[in-house]
Image: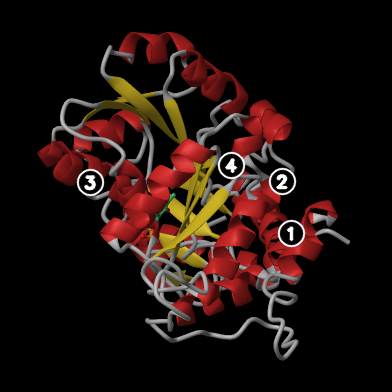
């Protein structure tokens, strides 16, 4: 059966398992070679030098393109390397429209690196078509969207916004890190380019740093291929293997991440130490309906605000099973304090305007037993309340 006719679970499990024709190995080998013999002058096996194309990386890239319904895939040394490679499409005098709430590292790259190459950006609520229209300039070249956003889980209607962008000749770039192609495929909804921090759910085990780009259309695919090779932001063969190994179990992991996150979000919503939970799986979330329409499931990460900023330090000190650490998307549960960690590079006034304040905690829910996670979190919240208020928690 042709791969494109398989369901996504089958395609994921089979990544790299049918491409090795010599030995029939069911997992694709790691080709560590950086150089490949040329049969004759002006002849090539298709592989010359590993920065340009490596057999192991090529299997991963083809799988990524297929999973995201794109035409070409590019594996990069990190999510930021992927984003920077895409941003290299732009130069002096170009303008970008960017999601107001987004990963702090992307903001830092735009403001502190891209700006030095003469590229400017306006940050807007990408669901507000009037605001988008107002921020569009004659030199606007692209729109950069995260949906849901990290950390506030704002949801953008991709079909509407990518349609608007196409109408105005803008490239739509979507960071699909939080949902992965298992739950959401932005290219099918009109995006031109998808980027990933594959370090997160795709890798899934907090043990490989990687990024992916998937492009739609010949022209963009050729431009990104040129930039990927010219910049050299490529993923190593062994990390390509490691990433494929993680991706094989993506479907199972995402289902468990979603179940655990939904159960815990419902628990926290009723908790007396918690003010608000930001998770698009909850019907009261402003992005709930759009999320239902454009995705087949929910990510395993959400944010919540404790009632008092003084609870944050003791909560982070008292969690035991959940690690206080700065990433997301792995099998192990991690908790992050965005205001001082992932989003520290975003100026205070922007952070506070979008709601990334000193009461916000981000929870990347792993695949542990949900009851153990709830017990750990509940104990930490109760201990924090007791320390701060001098009384019992819940
Ligand atoms: C949504 C999102 N995009 C991009 C990145 C950057 O990826 P990496 O850390 O793999 O460079 C991150 C990292 O946290 C992220 O959360």
The residues bearing labels 1 and 4 have C-alpha atoms spaced at a distance of 16 Å
Residue marked by disc 1: 255
Label 2 with label 1: CB-CB less than 8 Å: yes
Which of the two discs, 1 and 3, sits closer to the camera? Answer: 3
Residue marked by disc 4: 279
State the image coordinates of residue 118 (x, y, percent, origin top left). 13, 33
The residues bearing labels 3 and 2 have C-alpha atoms spaced at a distance of 30 Å
- Residue 329 is marked as none
The residues bearing labels 1 and 3 have C-alpha atoms spaced at a distance of 32 Å
Q: Quadrant of residue 140?
A: top left
- Residue 297 is marked as 2
Q: Residues within 10 Å of mark 1 (few under 14, many from 20)?
A: some
Q: Is residue 189 above or below residue 339?
A: above
Which of the two discs, 4 and 3, sits closer to the camera? Answer: 3
Q: Which residue is found at the position 69% from the left and 39% from the top?
A: 295
- Residue 108 is marked as 3
Under circle 1, the secondary element is helix
Label 3 with label 2: CB-CB less than 8 Å: no
State the image coordinates of residue 14 (x, y, percent, origin top left). 75, 71
Q: Earlier in the sequence, mark 1 or mark 4?
A: 1
Which image quarter is the C terminus in? bottom right
Q: Earlier in the sequence, mark 1 or mark 3?
A: 3
């Amino acid at each position: 059966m042709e791969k494109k006719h398989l369901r996504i679970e089958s395609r994921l499990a089979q990544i790299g398992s049918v491409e090795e024709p010599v030995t029939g190995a069911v997992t694709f080998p790691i080709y560590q070679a950086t150089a490949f013999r040329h049969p004759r002058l002006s002849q090539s096996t298709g592989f010359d030098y590993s920065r340009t194309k490596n057999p192991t990386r090529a299997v991963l890239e083809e799988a990524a393109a297929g999973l995201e319904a794109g035409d070409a895939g590019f594996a990069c040394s990190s999510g930021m390397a992927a984003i920077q490679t895409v941003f290299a499409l732009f130069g002096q005098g170009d303008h970008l429209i960017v999601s107001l709430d987004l990963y702090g590292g992307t903001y830092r790259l735009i403001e502190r690196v891209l700006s030095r190459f003469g590229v400017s950006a306006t940050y807007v609520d990408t669901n507000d078509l009037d605001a988008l229209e107002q921020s569009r300039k004659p030199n606007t070249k692209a729109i950069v969207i995260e949906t849901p956003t990290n950390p506030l889980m704002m949801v953008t209607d991709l079909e509407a916004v990518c349609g608007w962008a196409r109408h105005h000749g803008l490239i739509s770039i979507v960071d699909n890190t939080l949902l992965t192609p298992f739950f959401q495929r932005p290219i099918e909804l009109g995006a031109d380019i998808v980027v990933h921090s594959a370090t997160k759910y795709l890798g899934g085990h907090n043990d490989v740093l990687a990024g992916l780009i998937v492009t739609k259309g010949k022209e963009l695919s050729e431009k990104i291929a040129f930039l990927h090779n010219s910049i050299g932001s490529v993923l190593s063969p062994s990390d390509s293997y490691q990433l494929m190994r993680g991706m094989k179990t993506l479907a199972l992991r995402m289902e468990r991440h979603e179940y655990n996150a939904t159960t815990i979000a419902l628990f926290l919503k009723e908790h007396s130490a918690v003010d608000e939970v930001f998770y698009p799986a909850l019907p009261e979330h402003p992005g709930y309906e759009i999320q239902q329409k454009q995705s087949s499931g929910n990510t395993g990460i959400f944010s919540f605000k404790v009632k008092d900023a003084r609870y944050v330090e003791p909560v982070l000190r008292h969690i035991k099973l959940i690690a206080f650490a700065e990433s997301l998307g792995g099998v192990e549960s991690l908790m992050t304090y965005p205001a001082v960690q992932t989003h520290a590079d975003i100026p205070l006034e922007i952070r506070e305007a979008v709601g990334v304040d000193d009461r916000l905690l981000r929870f990347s829910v792993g695949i542990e037993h949900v009851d153990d996670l709830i017990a750990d979190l509940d104990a930490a919240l109760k201990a924090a309340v007791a320390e701060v208020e001098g009384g019992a928690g819940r």
